[in-house]
Image (spheres, coloured by chain):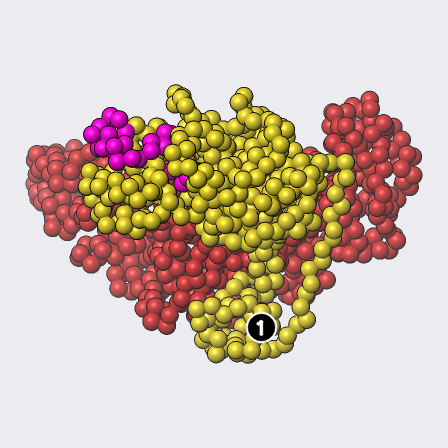
Chain colours: A yellow, B red
């Protein structure tokens, strides 16, 4: 039994019944077989014997010819699945990265642009690190310098907003840099990957000159929203329209299936700057989520960090008992920025005593920045600005649309 | 036997909804809702995959990849799982236990570890584009010596509201699918096995009942024919007829093949554009079409219009294939001139495409992409006619004929549902699954133990109220009375437009177990607090809002209020000539009159006693 390989034809006895099937794998002590009917079953490995080992089947692949008259887009993949293929013989679902494979899976893409692809990483987005953000920024920068009309970054959705914010700060881009992913797996006929990919390609050849996230705008397949990389947040665990712009309107929308792109006034247009990269980050930063009764001892884990963002309650508070520990952090040289768990709205530490005490302790009000964006910004500011006073000020300036001076009604 | 001579081989698949409290992969209730109750809707596009549409050319496939738009109704009884917006919950253990119980009753072997699969279905009836299904047990036996190959647990599809609009209330209701081996040799045998399996399923008492809750698919082939799967036979009585008609269809297709071969028939693979010929046609369909193409079927004349099944011709089959590309249908020269197409136009058409009298010309009209796709479909189906019977999935039409749905699905459409963990079926779990009494055995027991008439016993055993009946006899209530009440009386009350369900509820509004009201009344009869004839009246009053106690009292007091003896005397006196003629024999007919007067509110024995006394008194006076 231990010699069985995936694809082997095997015989198995189940309670006196003889079954034949294709051996797929062993998992949790059970052998998984695929019956001729297509069903998988789990059986005891000792009950299986090899009948024969068929020669492996090589899938046929035809190269897709791209239209040379169309603009060139670059697809940089980090692990998010934009396209996948199912091997029904074994049931395996494999992600597709090669341009030909992607175009075969999403034929509509070939009408929008030509593509070159670059596989940077194949990781789950929860395993992203600031150093991978830096590598990604460099790769995207190279693609822009290499003449790409726009860059599409495929990314797992969990931490996509962090990466989009990181690239927003690290890159000055004259072309669209579009993050895209899918909330429902690409193997299913209902996946959002096709619509998200087509919409992102339409944005990438369009007039935008910013880092953006393009994902479903509603639960229906009616339009995608274009979100600014520094104002977007994943607000649902599983829905297609999980990504939302917080505190601002989206940069625009892409109608589906017409793929008509509408940008809002005030978006940064294509060609507004020369490409540049500032890829230094200070990784020794942390995000602290306050909860009632939190022990001051927990802050000791943050001691020694160069920067800390606090996601405080309400207007930007923590319990009074934490304030001495925060003062100590600041005195040790840590830049501490206050944001709110409310996500919507602006921090104001001048209304209640606790807030005033926090300001006196040296905490910087993070205005209406999202906590995660504030963390990424803090890493970037501390990586690029050695002067601590100037760094403090930069945290309260709008660099890449991460902060608005006015809180508008209705967004 | 004729069917044996033809080499008929048939098998069935039965799909039965389970009456679980929650759906198979989410915690929503398993209840159907009126469409008007929907509280929202959304729409999606589903992408076709190659294995599903293998017979359609690449261009059409591309088109469908972008344009299959489906709308879905949501309810307050559906959730994000039905919307395909949330991963599935673990496989519902209640549904698995019922499925295993059925497997046990069929002598099957359980799979040690059950794996949930995704079966691709892109007709819109599943929001995800696949149906979740799991193989649970194998190798059972049937009374005819045949075998049950498999039993699977799967999720029910969404219900079609109309066209491409679906309702999500039904999506995800647990369904068992029982597949027999191709072990049946006659239409009647197919029907018997379907009835038997239906009885086994109902024996569990845990399956849904009513139209649409059970569906049969029938697999049929004859010698030299091909395996054809007919889906969605809902009426059990029609199964044999469906089989007979499919055998006939395959025979006639084989006969057409024979004649096509004799004629040296062939199919032109190059459709010709004939749009210009019909620019002034009297046919609205042709006038409106931006493109009309013709496919010449050499040597097919007369055979395309030949009937192969009641209401169906070879032309209907060509038309079904063409419709897959979005055209409304086809015209062919076996049925022309007609539908506004003139004889002159037909001659011009034949001349244009160079068709001889022995040839049949098929016309396809629509927009260019539809028409090109539909021509390829017509060519494909016409070529099948030269080979005989194509393997197909077909759907039943009213009366038992069938139309083409799609090619037979293969194993290629399944892959693992990675969001659902495999479920072990340990030998301890399997041993603990109880076997239940089959309904036919239960009917026999009711007859034997409770002295019910055979027909009533069967009706009671198969009734959805069988558990209430069992409870009634356990309480010492007369079996005859319980059966009559639960079968006839409830039906009469329902027929009068009354909702009898509250009478049967075994829990109150707070969910506390209670004795169902119908049993409270039957106990009242047992304890002689109310006459058995009064049961319908009492139940009626309860439905109208009275408590069982007050309803019984009210009916009894109406009766007690009347002076029974006086009533009996006056009835006898008014009918003296009759009484004199019949003597004591008059008792029976007068009982009827008297019971009507007391509106059934008094126990018959007591009425009989009083009436008897009045009669003897009257006869004695004489």
- In reply to whether residue B439 is colored magenta, the answer given is no
Q: Residue B160 or B576: which is nearer the viewer?
A: B160
Q: Quadrant of the C terminus of chain B?
A: top left
- Counting from the top left corner in percent of width and height, residue B177 is at 48, 57
- Counting from the top left corner in percent of width and height, residue A4 is at 56, 75
Label 1 resides on the chain identified as A
Magenta segment boundaries in residue numbering: A349-378
Seen at 44% across and 56% down, the residue is B420
Residue furthest to the front: A387
- Counting from the top left corner in percent of width and height, residue B257 is at 79, 54
Helix, strand or loop under label 1? loop
User: Residue B535, can we see it?
Assistant: no
Residue B186 lies in what quarter of the image? bottom right
| Left or right: B532, with B176 as reference point | left
Q: Residue B359 or A332: which is nearer the viewer?
A: A332
Instruction: Determine whether B157 is above or below B475 in the image.
Output: above
Seen at 33% across and 35% down, the residue is A338
Q: Residue A16 or B386: which is nearer the viewer?
A: A16
- Counting from the top left corner in percent of width and height, residue A94 is at 58, 56
User: Residue B278, can we see it?
Assistant: yes
Seen at 61% across and 62% down, the residue is A89
Q: Residues within 10 Å of mark 1 (few under 14, many from 20)?
A: some
Q: Quadrant of the N terminus of chain B?
A: bottom right
| Left or right: B432, with A221 as reference point | left
| Left or right: B426, with B322 as reference point | left
Residue B547 lies in what quarter of the image? top left
The residue carrying mark 1 is A5
């Amino acid at each position: 039994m231990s010699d069985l390989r995936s694809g082997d034809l095997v015989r198995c006895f189940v309670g006196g019944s003889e079954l034949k099937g294709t051996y797929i794998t062993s998992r949790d002590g059970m052998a998984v077989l695929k019956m001729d009917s297509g069903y998988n079953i789990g059986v005891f490995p000792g009950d299986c014997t090899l009948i024969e080992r068929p020669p492996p089947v090589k899938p046929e692949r035809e190269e897709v010819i791209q239209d040379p008259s169309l603009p060139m887009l670059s697809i940089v993949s980090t692990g998010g699945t934009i396209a996948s293929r199912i091997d029904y013989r074994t049931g395996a679902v494999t992600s597709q990265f090669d341009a030909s494979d992607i175009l075969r899976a999403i034929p509509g893409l070939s009408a929008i642009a030509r593509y070159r692809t670059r596989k940077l990483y194949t990781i789950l987005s929860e395993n992203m690190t600031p150093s991978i953000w830096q590598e990604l920024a460099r790769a995207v920068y190279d693609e822009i310098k290499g003449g790409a009309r726009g860059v599409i970054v495929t990314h797992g959705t969990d931490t996509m907003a962090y990466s989009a914010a990181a690239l927003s700060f690290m890159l000055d881009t004259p072309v669209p840099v579009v993050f895209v992913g899918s909330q429902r797996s690409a193997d299913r006929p209902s996946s959002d990957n096709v619509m998200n990919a087509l919409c992102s390609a339409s944005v990438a050849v369009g007039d935008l000159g910013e880092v953006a996230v393009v994902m479903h705008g509603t639960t229906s397949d009616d339009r995608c929203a274009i979100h600014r990389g520094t104002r977007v947040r994943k607000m649902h665990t599983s829905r297609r329209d999980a990504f939302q712009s917080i505190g601002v309107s989206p940069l625009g929308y892409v109608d589906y299936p017409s793929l008509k792109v509408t940008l809002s006034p005030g978006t940064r247009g294509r060609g507004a700057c020369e490409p540049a990269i500032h890829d230094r980050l200070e990784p020794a930063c942390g995000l602290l989520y306050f909860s009632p009764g939190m022990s001051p001892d927990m802050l000791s884990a943050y001691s020694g960090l160069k920067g800390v963002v606090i996601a405080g309650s309400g207007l930007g508070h923590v319990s009074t008992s934490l304030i001495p520990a925060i003062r100590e952090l600041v005195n040790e040289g840590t830049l501490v920025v206050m944001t709110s768990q409310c996500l919507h709205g602006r921090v104001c530490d001048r209304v209640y005593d606790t807030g005033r005490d926090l300001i006196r302790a040296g905490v910087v009000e993070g205005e209406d920045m999202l906590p995660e964006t504030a963390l990424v910004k803090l890493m970037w500011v501390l990586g690029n600005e050695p002067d601590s006073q100037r760094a403090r000020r930069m945290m309260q300036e709008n660099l890449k649309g991460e902060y608005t001076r006015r809180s508008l009604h209705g967004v | 036997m004729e069917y044996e001579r033809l080499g008929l081989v048939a098998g069935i698949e039965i799909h039965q909804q389970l009456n679980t409290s929650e759906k198979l992969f989410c915690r929503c209730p398993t209840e159907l809702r009126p469409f008007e109750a929907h509280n929202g809707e959304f729409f999606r596009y589903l992408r076709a995959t190659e294995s599903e549409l293998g017979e359609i050319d690449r261009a059409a496939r591309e088109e469908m990849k972008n344009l299959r738009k489906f709308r879905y109704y949501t309810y307050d009884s559906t959730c994000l799982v039905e919307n395909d917006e949330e991963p599935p919950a673990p496989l519902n253990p209640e549904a698995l236990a019922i499925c295993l119980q059925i497997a046990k009753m069929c002598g099957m072997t359980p799979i040690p570890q059950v794996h949930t699969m995704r079966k691709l279905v892109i007709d819109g009836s599943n929001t995800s584009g696949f149906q979740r299904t799991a193989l649970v047990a194998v190798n059972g036996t049937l009374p005819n010596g045949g075998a049950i190959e498999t039993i699977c647990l799967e999720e029910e599809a969404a219900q079609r509201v109309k066209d491409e609009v679906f309702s999500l209330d039904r999506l995800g209701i647990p369904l068992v699918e029982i597949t027999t081996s191709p072990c049946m040799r006659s239409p009647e045998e197919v029907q018997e096995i379907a009835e038997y399996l239906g009885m086994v399923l109902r024996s569990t008492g845990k399956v849904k009942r009513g139209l649409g809750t059970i569906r049969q698919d029938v697999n049929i082939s004859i010698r030299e024919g091909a395996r054809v799967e007919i889906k969605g036979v809902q009426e059990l009585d029609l199964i044999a007829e469906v089989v007979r008609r499919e055998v006939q269809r395959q025979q006639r297709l084989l006969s057409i093949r024979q004649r096509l071969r004799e004629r040296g028939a062939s199919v032109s693979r190059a459709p010709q554009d004939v749009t210009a010929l019909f620019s002034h046609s009297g046919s609205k369909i042709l006038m409106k079409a931006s493109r009309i193409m013709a496919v010449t079927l050499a040597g097919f004349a007369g055979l395309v219009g030949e009937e192969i099944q009641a209401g169906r011709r070879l032309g209907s089959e060509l038309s079904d294939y063409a419709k897959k590309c979005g055209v409304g249908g086809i015209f062919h020269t076996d049925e022309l001139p007609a539908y506004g197409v003139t004889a002159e136009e037909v001659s011009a058409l034949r001349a244009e495409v160079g068709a001889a009298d022995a040839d049949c010309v098929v016309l396809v009209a629509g927009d260019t992409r539809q028409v090109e796709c539909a021509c390829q479909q017509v060519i494909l189906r016409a070529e099948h006619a030269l080979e005989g019977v194509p393997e197909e999935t077909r759907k039943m039409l009213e009366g038992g004929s069938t139309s083409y749905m799609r090619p037979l699905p293969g194993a290629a459409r399944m892959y693992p549902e990675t969001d659902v963990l495999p479920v072990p079926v340990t030998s301890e779990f399997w041993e603990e699954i109880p076997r239940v009494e089959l309904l036919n055995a239960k009917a026999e027991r009711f007859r034997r133990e409770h002295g019910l008439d055979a027909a009533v016993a069967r009706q009671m055993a198969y009734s959805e109220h069988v558990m209430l009946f069992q409870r009634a006899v356990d309480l010492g209530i007369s079996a005859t009375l319980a059966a009559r009440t639960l079968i006839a009386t409830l039906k009469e009350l329902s027929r009068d437009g009354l909702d009898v369900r509250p009478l049967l509820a075994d829990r109150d509004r707070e969910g506390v177990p209670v004795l169902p009201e119908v049993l409270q009344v039957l106990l009242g009869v047992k304890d002689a607090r109310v006459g058995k004839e009064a049961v319908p009246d009492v139940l009626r009053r309860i439905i109208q809002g009275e408590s069982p106690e007050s309803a019984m009292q009210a009916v009894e007091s109406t009766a007690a209020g009347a002076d029974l003896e006086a009533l009996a005397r006056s009835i006898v006196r008014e009918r003296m000539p009759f009484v004199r003629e019949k003597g004591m024999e008059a008792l029976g007919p007068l009982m009827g009159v008297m019971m009507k007067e007391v509106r059934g509110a008094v126990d018959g024995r007591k009425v009989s006693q009083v009436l008897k006394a009045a009669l003897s008194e009257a006869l004695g006076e004489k």
